[in-house]
Structures are given as C-alpha cells and as structure tokens.
Amino acid sequence: MMSQVLLALAGNQNSGKTTLFNVLTGSNQHVGNFPGVTVEKKIGVLKEYKEASLVDLPGIYSLSPYTSEEIVTRDFILQEHPDVIINIVDATNMERNLYLSLQLMELQVPMVIALNMMDEVEKSGNSIDVEDLSKQLGIPVVAISAARKQGISELIRVVKRMVKHPMEMPKCDFCKGEVHRAIHAIAHIVEDHAQTVGVPLRFAATKLVEGDLKMQEALALHEDDVHIIEDIVMSMEHALETDREAALADMRYTYIEGICKKSVHKVNESYGQRRSEQIDRLLTHRYLGIPIFILIMFLIFYLTFALFGAYLQGWMEEGIDLFTVWLSQLLYQSGVSAWLCALIIDGICTGVGSVLSFLPIIVILFFFLSLLEDSGYMARVAFVMDKSLRRIGLSGKSFVPMLIGFGCSVPAIMSARTLSSERDRKMTILLTPFMSCSAKLPIYGMITAAFFPKHSALILISVYLLGIAVAIISGFLLKHTVFQGDSIPFVMELPAYRIPAFKSVLLHMWEKAKDFLHRAFTIIFVASILIWFLQSFDWQLNYIDDSSKSILASLGSALAKGLAPLGFDDWRAATALVSGISAKESVVSTLSVLVGGGEGDLYAALQSMMTPLSAYAFLSFTVLYMPCVAAFAATRRELGSWKEALLTIGYQTLSAYVVAMLIYQIGSLFL
Ligand code: GDP
Ligand code: MG
C-alpha cells in the first residue's frame, strides 16, 4: 500500500543515506563504506510518521546522466514527484556534497538538507553555522548524525511541516556573467516545451547548457531551436575560454565556496580524514599497494579455504551424510518404492548436499570481504587497480567482482551491480566467470591426482593464470568490437577509514547465507532432480541400473563426438561436463558415479579415457566454459535479458572450446 506522502532520500555516495534510511524506517539495509553499494532504490515507511514512505535513492555526485544511478535518481524525482526531498549532505565534505544540492534545488521540489556526520565535525573541533547556511540557501537545514541517531526527530518535524505547508523553492539564481546570460536566453527558448513535458524550466535550461542529449530528446526541441541553443552555448564557451561543462561546474563551485566561507568554521581537518591520509600513504603506495593487497587476499583465502573453511566444510559434509543415512533408512523402512528412494537420496540429497557443504566457506569469505568493504579498504584497492584494468577497457570498480569471482561467480556477478555504467557492468558480468571459482577445485584435484601428481601446484597455478589471460584477451577483443568506447571516468572518492560496525558485517553475512540457501533449495534442487532423472531412465522411460544406457549417456555420446578435436571424446567426460552445469563440483561426482568403485578405479578409468595432454585440455575447458546454472541465473537476472545471458554463456563456452582445442592440437604436434 502506498502511503499518501512520498519522501525521497538523495545524496552523494557514502554520505550516510542508507544509515539514515535505516534509522528513519527501522529497516536493515546493508550499509557499506564502499561507494555505490546502493544501486536499486529501496522503499520503507517512516517509523515516526506512518503516513510517509521514504525512497532510498542511489548515491550520486551530480544529476548528469553519466551513470545508471544518476538516471534512476533523476527519473524518480521528475516522474514520481516526491513531496519532499531529504538531501543528505556529508558535513565533513561540504563542497563536494553541495554540488549535488544545488542541482537538486533546480528541480523545484521542496527540499530539506540533513547535514550528516556532525559528530565527526564536532570531534575535529570545527563548526558549521547551520542557521546561516539555511539562510544562504533559502531552504531548511537540520544538523544530524545518522550513526548516533542525533537530530532525527528534529528532521522529521521539519519534514512534516514542509509536507503540510509546501514551500515555494527559492529561485536560487547562483549564476553570474556569461553562464547566466546563456541559461536565461535558453530558458526563454524552451519555456513552452518544458511546461508541456513538465520539467522545471531552470533545470532544463542548465542541462541544455551542459549539452545533455537526454534533455534535448525529452523536450522534443525543434531543429532550429537546437541550432540556436548551440550558438548561444558556443559564444559562451568562446567568451569564457572553457568548455560548457567546465563553465557550469566552475560557476557552481564558486558559489558553493562563497557559502562555505561564511558558514563553515574550519580549524582542523577532520580527525577521520587525517588518520585516513596516514593509512593511505602505505596502502595506496605506488609500488607497495598491489603487493600489500595480494598479501591480504592471500591471507583471507588461506583463512577461508585452508584454515576455517576446510574444517567447517568437513563438519557440514558429515552432518549431511548423517542426515542422508538417517533419511534413507527411514525411506527404506516405510517401504517407499526403489526409484523414489533413489530420486531422494542419489538425486536430491547428493545434489543439494554437495552444494550445501560450501555454505561455511561462503559465509566466512563474506565475513572477511565485508570487513574489507566496510572499513573502506576495498575502495582503495579499486583505486590502485584502476590503471591496469583501464587497459582492457574496464575501470577499477570492476575489480571487486573479479576478485569475488575466485570464490564464487554468483555473488561476483551480483556485485557487478555496483558498477555505474551499463557497459562496464555487462563486460564485467561476461568476464568474471573466467576467474576460476572455488567449486572447480575438486575437478583440479581429481585431474592432477590422476595425471600430474608431482606437478600439482604448477598445474593449478597455470590453470588460474589461463583464466585470467583469457579474460584479458577477451577484454581487449570486446573493447574493440562489442563494447567500444572507454570506461566511465573513475570519480570515486576515497571514503575515510572506519571501524566496521559489527551489526553491519553480521547483516552482510546473513544476507549472503540466505541467498545461498535459497539457491540451493531452488535451482540446485531442480537441477539435481533433472540430472538424476536423465541418468536413471532410458528413452523409453524404463528405470535402469546401467547408466550407460540412460538418456544422459546417449546425449553424452552425441556430445562426445563434438569434443573429439579437444582430445576427450568419451561420453562419460562429456556427460560430466554437462552435469557440471548444475554445479561444478558435480563434474567429479558424476564421473565417480559413472565409473563406480573407489578413488583408484576412478584414476585408472580417467587414464584410459585421456592422455595427460587431453587431460590438460579437459582442465582448460572446465576453467573457461559456461558457469553453473546458479551463475547463469544470476547473469540473466543482472543483465535482465535472456538473449544477452545466452550470448554471454555462448561466448564463454566457445572460448573454452577454442582454447582447449588449441592446447590439444598444438600440444599434439610436440608430444
Ligand atoms: P550511503 O552510501 O550514502 O548509503 O552511506 P552509508 O549509509 O552506507 O554510510 C557510509 C558510512 O558512513 C558507513 O560506514 C556509516 O557507518 C558511516 N556513517 C553514516 N552516518 C554517520 C554519522 O552520522 N557519523 C559517522 N561518524 N559515520 C556515519
Ligand atoms: Mg547506501
């Protein structure tokens, strides 16, 4: 049910929007000290003001449509006509934040400024004359601290008053000289158009000065008008000797500087900023930055996978085994038919169980990652990696999803949501699965044990590097073909380091666990049933014992023919690869089931199926080919289109095929 009053929460990234949203609505959204955590808009009802619902808009720096966040925010305000905008401003970083405020004011929607982080301002001994600031801007300003819940009731009081007595927004005429002349001249020309489409006139005029094509389209301007506007802007650029965007930015900043000079009394840099600068001198060091990061990640992977994860995963597996044994006895005793027993035990329990056993690893990994994120370190890493990624047409922000991809592609693909441009997001989603995920480790373990027992470390490293290399080459290729153009300029501001809030970290872990469990009991559940079915019936739907006569086997042999150029044209290998689509671990379990017997039998069978060279080609194929169903579902959801998702996995599988074939064919010349 929609409440009668609609409030919008807008502000820069990291200004504390989500924190304030949670305080006001009593909900538990994830708070992150990483720019761009909120991309979708969230909605909630105010605890102390039940008639009003509040929308948490994505964090933005300006209202120019460079990023999807900015478009979401702008469209929301222009189309949904909120009653009041609560513009949250980081008081420790006023200049930057007021830049957005000025643009929001142009939208002519009643607005109040919530001046956040006042606790930090006080701690550093600075002060801000809130009353003076309010007088200068002509709109209410309330000092708050969202994290400490200070000033919140005053904020609500002001909002209520504004809803009851909607105020006229001041015609904040902060422009001067040439820009002033251009804005007003253009305003004259587009006045009728703006009124027809319902866009605030001054906002429209300013955007046209900036050269905003979306605004040009929205206003449906006549071609002659467009020409006249361009002339006006050109003569302005000429007179000022800068380009249009710089001219506007310059004007806004000059105005803001004037305001801040009067109302901000700065004696010290804020304590947090000073501390952050000291830490940054080490962590974003030109040469040490990347090695330090690799060290930290190594430690996290070690703690997650080797130390805690392995134990907990072992326990989890034992628990699942005990449950399976108990369940199969129960089923046996109650006289359930053999095929149903097999479906439940060999299909569902084995399938869902093998995935569930990864829950501890996922939770632990996300514990560490959210520590890194909330402390503000991840933002630094993205900053440090930006330059290298730019070469393959991505920006530093794509780095985080890639990194998570080494753990699991699903959260990695979901985390690409925080990327600002569509282009970067799609490219990242496409390339992330090339980062070898942890579910593939059992496959590497099996193949190295059977073929390269003495060189397992070397083989493992080469396989990881192969994935990275293919991602880099693909990045180059895509940059010059499908995704032309450069990545969006990386204007991420480094947030101050903060001690992560325990509650926020726990919340993050819980969200991941919930998501993972949900997947295990939906997608994996269904996929397990399907694989079991295909493995246990023949085309006449007879329930069979010998799986080599199953539907799966006949499909597998058809597929195996196509795999001949890669060196492993065995129906069991082909089948294992197909079942790997449900979850990568099931490549191993499928092979074990199809071969039967213990570890030794499995290795002997593998050696009869493949040569060391074709085994390596098989490994390469598993690193690169399409990710599991869960990752595919995430891809589809994030891309929002079946076609693009199918193209994505098509590309991945094709590159796996080509690379594995090259390895096998070229290798055959020498070996
Ligand atoms: P968003 O990106 O605008 O949604 O910002 P978040 O709500 O995620 O907050 C960013 C960071 O600022 C988090 O680490 C918060 O804990 C912190 N924060 C939010 N409000 C305050 C405040 O009033 N004082 C202080 N010291 N920190 C705050
Ligand atoms: Mg947020």
Image (cartoon, rainbow, N blue to C red):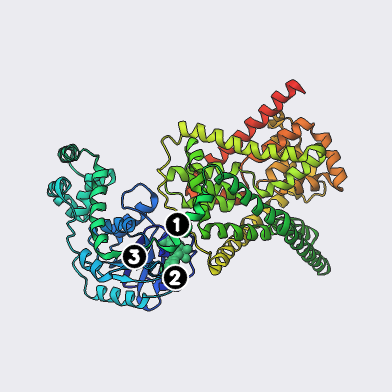
Image depth: mark 3 or mark 2 in front: 2
- Amino acid of disc 1: Pro
Q: What residue sits right under mark 2 in the picture?
A: 147
Confirm or deny contact between disc 3 and disc 2 (CB under 8 A): no
Which of the marked residues, 1 or 2, is nearer the chain's N terminus? 2
Cβ at disc 2 under 8 Å from ligand 1:
yes
Query: Secondary structure beneath disc 2?
Result: loop
- Image quarter of residue 508: bottom right
Where does residue 126 sit, x and y in percent of width and height?
35, 67
Q: Is residue 521 above or below residue 3?
A: above
Q: Is residue 498 above or below residue 619?
A: below
Is residue 538 at all visible to an observer of this figure?
A: no
Query: Secondary structure beneath disc 3?
Result: strand
Residue that sits furthest to the front in the current view: 267
Q: Is residue 295 left or right of residue 187?
A: right
Residue 495 - label: 1
Cβ at disc 1 under 8 Å from ligand 1:
yes
- Amino acid of disc 3: Ala
Q: Quadrant of the N terminus?
A: bottom left
Query: Secondary structure beneath disc 1?
Result: loop
Residue at 26 percent across and 65 percent down: it is: 263
- Image quarter of residue 322: bottom right
Q: What residue sits right under mark 3 in the picture?
A: 8
The quadrant of the rendered image in which ligand 1 is seen is bottom left
Q: Mark 2 Cα within 10 Å, few/some/many (few <14, many 20+)?
A: some
Q: Is residue 389 above or below residue 614?
A: below
Q: Mark 1 Cα within 10 Å, few/some/many (few <14, many 20+)?
A: many
